[in-house]
Image: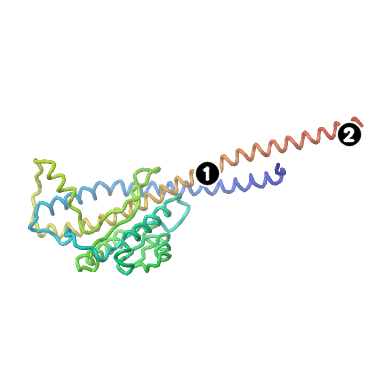
């Protein structure tokens, strides 16, 4: 059995760790509250606007945008979201593992034809370790989502797709569902997918596009397309940010619970050791008096 001094030192050490994990949980929880408000306010708006765009493009086939056209994939881009820091459970590890799977699936195109845009220092490190040079880096965005910066990235990705520099753009990020659940999703950003709208049209004979378009469909489309694409990318960033804080909150909660359990076990061990020392001293005293 460990000595009283050793057990006491371990109790002090665990108490110190407990204070750190509790403080980190409180900070992460406060950040999560703000991030959750942002994504829960943005998500329904982005979903409705995206559906409006898809329905509009499907209803006007003569205006079939280049952004909806699928073509043979020779060069593909990936925007992948992770965090700058650690201590958030399996959040970053899951992103890195899925990124490696994506690379393996697309490696047939050639390494030079895989264009990676990492957002977050952890995934940037993984991208470099995998032998890729990031097209651009956006470490700051992982901590402080910036609508203007992400809009500029969306515009560059759109231009690359329209110019034929890339034939598909994918997004890899965590979708925030609750504090305990964040789903890692891989979605096609470009070309714009109309399959869900067309499936809805086939399944419902009463499907009618009920929009009055002013001043003209062309003018409306020129405004709506870049707006939706920028919003999709910004929503993915907010989703990832909220998921990171949720994962860190849960990780620190688990660490705090484990520290409390360990502290309880060490306290019992300390009391048993102290009781044993006192018992031994009493026995020694009793033995001495009998002599």
Count the labels in the image.
2
Q: Look at the image and tell me in which quarter the C terminus lies.
A: top right
Residues at marks 2 and 1 touching, judged by CB atoms closer than 8 Å: no
Which is nearer the eye, 3 or 20?
A: 3
The numbered mark, 2 or 1, whose residue comes first in the sequence reads 1
Residue 144 percent coordinates (x, y): 37, 58
- Image check: 101 left or right of 260? left
Q: Please, what secondary structure does the residue beneath circle 2 have? A: helix
Which is nearer the eye, 19 or 248?
A: 248
Residue 137 percent coordinates (x, y): 36, 65
Q: Mark 1 points at which residue?
A: 256
Whole-angstrom CA distance, mark 2 to mark 1, is 47 Å
Q: Which mark is residue 288?
A: 2
- State which quadrant residue 283 falls in: top right
Q: Please, what secondary structure does the residue beneath circle 1 have? A: helix
Q: Is residue 165 above or below residue 70?
A: below
Point 56% across, 46% down: residue: 18
- State which quadrant residue 69 falls in: bottom left
- Image check: 125 left or right of 267? left
Q: Residues within 10 Å of mark 2 (few under 14, many from 20)?
A: few
Q: In this view, does 157 lie above or below 88?
A: below
Image depth: mark 2 or mark 1 in front? 2
Which is nearer the eye, 106 or 151?
A: 106
Residue 23 percent coordinates (x, y): 51, 48
Residue 232 percent coordinates (x, y): 26, 55
Point 54% across, 49% down: residue: 20
- State which quadrant residue 117 falls in: bottom left
């Amino acid at each position: 059995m460990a000595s009283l001094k050793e057990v006491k030192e371990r109790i002090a050490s665990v108490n110190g760790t407990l204070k750190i994990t509790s403080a980190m949980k409180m900070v992460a929880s406060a950040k999560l509250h703000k991030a959750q408000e942002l994504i829960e306010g943005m998500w329904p708006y982005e979903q409705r606007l995206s559906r409006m765009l898809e329905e509009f493009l499907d209803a006007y086939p003569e205006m079939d945008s280049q952004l909806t056209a699928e073509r043979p994939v020779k060069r593909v881009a990936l925007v992948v979201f992770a965090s700058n820091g650690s201590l958030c459970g399996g959040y970053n590890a899951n992103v890195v593992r899925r990124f490696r799977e994506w690379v393996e699936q697309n490696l047939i195109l050639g390494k030079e034809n895989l264009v990676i845009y990492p957002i977050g220092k952890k995934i940037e490190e993984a991208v470099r370790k995998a032998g890729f040079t990031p097209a651009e880096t956006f470490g700051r965005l992982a901590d402080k989502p910036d609508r203007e910066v992400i809009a500029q990235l969306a515009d560059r990705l759109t231009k690359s797709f329209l110019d034929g520099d890339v034939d598909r753009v994918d997004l890899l990020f965590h979708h925030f569902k609750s504090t305990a659940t964040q789903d890692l999703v891989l979605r096609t950003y470009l070309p714009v997918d109309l399959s869900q709208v067309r499936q809805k049209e086939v399944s419902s004979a009463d499907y009618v596009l009920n929009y009055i378009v002013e001043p003209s469909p062309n003018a409306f489309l020129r405004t709506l397309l870049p707006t939706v694409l920028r919003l999709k990318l910004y929503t993915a960033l907010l989703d990832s940010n909220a998921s990171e804080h949720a994962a860190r909150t849960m990780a620190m909660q688990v660490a705090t619970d484990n520290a409390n359990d360990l502290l309880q076990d060490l306290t019992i061990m300390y009391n048993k050791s102290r009781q044993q020392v006192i018992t031994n001293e009493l026995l020694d005293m009793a033995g001495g008096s009998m002599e």
